[in-house]
Amino acid sequence: SRTTISDFRFEFSGYGHYKVTYTSPVTLKEWSFITTDMPLIDATKNEDNPKQCDLELLKRRCKIGN
């Protein structure tokens, strides 16, 4: 299934930092990481129609934890 922006939660965690949590729509398992990668946040959280490749990158980074 395609990754969608609704699979993610974004929490502001201090200047230039976001905690991003990915929840698998199938297993409901969650993975989180804290990022300062604002271009990635802009391409996903702040984008009206995020690209699939950016969502996949964000998911991968949640799963590896950085």
Image: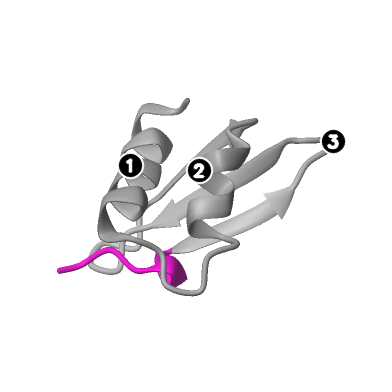
Question: Helix, strand, or loop for circle 2?
Answer: helix
Q: Give the class, few, some or many, for how many residues have Cα within 10 Å of label 1's Cα (few <14, many ≥20).
A: few
Given the image, on which type of amino acid does mark 2 rest? Answer: Leu
The residue to which callout 2 is attached is 40
**Mark 1 secondary-structure assignment:** helix
> Is 15 placed left or right of 24 in the picture?
right
Q: Residue at x 39, y 34 (%)?
A: 61
- Which residue is located at x 33 percent, y 42 percent? 57
SS of the residue under disc 3: loop
Residue 65 image point, x, y percent = 45, 28
Amino acid at dot 3: Tyr
Q: Along the polypeptide, which appears first: circle 1 or circle 3?
A: 3
Disc nearer the start of the sequence (3/2): 3
Residue 15 drawn at (x, y percent):
84, 35
Residue occupied by mark 3? 15
The front one of 65 and 16 is: 16
Q: Which is nearer the N-term, disc 1 or disc 2?
A: 2
Q: CA distance from mark 3 to mark 2?
A: 16 Å
Answer whether residue 2 is magenta in the image.
yes
Left or right: residue 24 compared with residue 11: left
Asked if 16 appears above or below 7 in the picture, the reply is above
Q: Which residues are magenta?
A: 1-7
Q: How is the image coloured?
A: one colour
Q: Nearer the viewer, residue 17 or 33?
A: 17
User: Circles 1 and 2: CB distance less than 8 Å?
Assistant: yes
Q: Quadrant of the N terminus?
A: bottom left
Q: Residue furthest right?
A: 15
Residue drawn at x 28%, y 63% is 3
Q: Nearer the viewer, mark 1 or mark 2?
A: 2
Query: What label does residue 57 carry, if any?
Result: 1
Q: CA distance from mark 1 to mark 3?
A: 22 Å
What is the crowding at mark 3: few (fewer than 14 residues within 10 Å), some, or many (at least 20)?
few
